[in-house]
Image: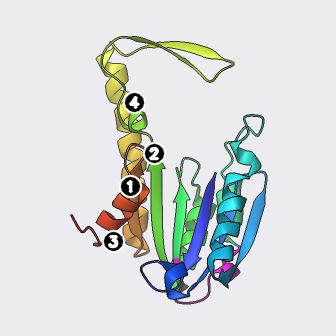
Amino acid sequence: RGGTFRHSGTGSAQQQGDRVGGLVFSDEEHREVKPQRGKPAVLHLINRLVSHPAWERSAAPKPSGAGLGAALRLRRLARPGSLVFLLSDFRDLGAAAERQLGVLARHADVVLVFIHDPIEAALPPPGRYRVSDGIDELVFDTRDRALADAYSGRFREREAALQRLARRHKMVLAPCPTDRSLVTSLQACLGLDRS
């Protein structure tokens, strides 16, 4: 459940003639796109991303975190001096993956793009809610403030752990809630906000 995207330099890699490559992965499968120049390389990477079987409901994620750790060991994709964007929810980030991130950060500039839904940070207003994924259904009650506070606290702990990890290895953490443009979030975190 994640991906790494690599380009050298800043701005639009494709417009500047930089090489673009990536690794799209889940616990079950890794798809590597070797860095190349030009629009076809960008389109090929996007195609590999959107066609990954992790998007199918049948490809249920495993809580092992093995995918992230294994993917980061494939750092040969990122040459020294590369700029690496790692897009993930980092839900299953374990000690092995953290060590691999540290190794990667020693020879590349790493941006951790922390993708999350706002409902992960805080439950909706007090009430009873029915949710479904199209097959299974669940009803939950957000009127219990202790439950709501504990729920928010778990998200804050995960975010704080990512912040500590980023500081320790001199990486950039770019929080990216799904109700905000990815481009806007990255511009703000990288100091490129033009607003």
Tell me which segment is drawn in magenta: 74-83
**Mark-to-mark CA distance, 3 and 2:** 19 Å
Q: 64 or 40, which is in the foreground?
A: 40
Residue under pointer 1: 175
Residue 78, position as x, y percentages in the image = 62, 81
Q: Tag 2: residue type?
A: His
Callout 4 secondary element: helix
> Which one is earlier in the sequence, the residue at label 2 or at label 1?
2
Res 190 label:
3
* Residue 75 on the magenta span: yes
Image vertical order of residue 162 relative to residue 158, above or below = below
**Mark-to-mark CA distance, 4 and 3:** 29 Å
> Which one is earlier in the sequence, the residue at label 4 or at label 3?
4
Callout 1 secondary element: strand
> Which one is earlier in the sequence, the residue at label 1 or at label 3?
1
Using a 10 Å C-alpha cutoff, classify the residue at mark 3 as few (fewer than 14 neighbours), some (14 to 19) or many (20 or more): few
